[in-house]
Amino acid sequence: MPETSPATARTGLAPDVADRLRRDAHGLVAAVVQQHDTREVLMVGWMDDEALHRTLTSGRVTFWSRSRQEYWRKGDTSGHAQYVKAVSLDCDGDALLVEVDQVGAACHTGTRTCFEAGGPVPAVVGHRPDPSTAGGPA
């Protein structure tokens, strides 16, 4: 049976943290997960106040599953745990950066990151103008 939904979850999240969050219509914020020492981006998950509270107070990352409508802690079934090193909120309050020590694969497909499994998307590569030749500030 799914746990309480994000919209009705009672949480112990500190008010000064909760007040800074800008949640989506479902009460969620995006959580970008990054390996703390290499800065490799591992995955993106979703957190409500309770998932963030659990993450901040347990030392392990907890997410809200939008598809299963329940909380899940990375590594509980796979053994591929994420140990929290730091958590930061972006300037708009609508995204978190969770720095972790990742054990094993971060992606459910078995790859180190979820961005390996998804593969590249064709994009035009931009080039920064050279200020000395572009007439811009030096």
Image (cartoon, helix red, strand yellow):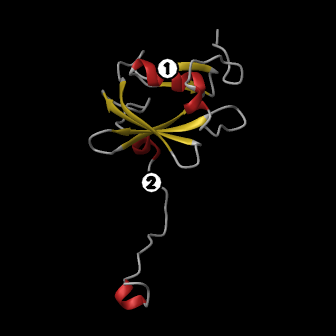
The residue that mark 2 highlights is 120
**Marking on residue 33:** none
Contact between marks 2 and 1 (CB within 8 A): the answer is no
Left/right placement of residue 28 relative to residue 126 reads right
The type of residue carrying mark 2 is Pro
Q: CA distance from mark 2 to mark 1?
A: 33 Å
| Nearer the camera: disc 2 or disc 1 | 1
The type of residue carrying mark 1 is Arg
The residue that mark 1 highlights is 54
The residue carrying pointer 1 sits among few (fewer than 14), some (14 to 19) or many (20 or more) residues within 10 Å by Cα, namely: many
- Residue in the picture at 60% in, 18% down: 11
The image quadrant of residue 5 is top right
In the rendered image of this protein, does residue 73 appear above or below residue 113? above
Looking at this view, is 90 or 126 the one in front?
90
Q: Secondary structure at mark 2?
A: loop
Q: Position of residue 65 (x, y in %)?
A: 58, 25
In this view, the residue farthest toward the top is: 1
The residue carrying pointer 2 sits among few (fewer than 14), some (14 to 19) or many (20 or more) residues within 10 Å by Cα, namely: few
- The image shows a total of numbered marks equal to 2
- Residue in the picture at 37% in, 83% down: 130
The image quadrant of residue 67 is top right
Dot 2 or dot 1, earlier in sequence: 1
Q: In the rendered image, which quarter contains the N terminus?
A: top right
Q: Secondary structure at mark 1?
A: helix
Q: Position of residue 15 (x, y in %)?
A: 59, 27
In this view, the residue farthest toward the left is: 37
Q: Position of residue 119 (x, y in %)?
A: 44, 49
Looking at this view, is 36 or 75 the one in front?
36
Left/right placement of residue 64 relative to residue 133 reads right
Q: Position of residue 86 (x, y in %)?
A: 38, 34
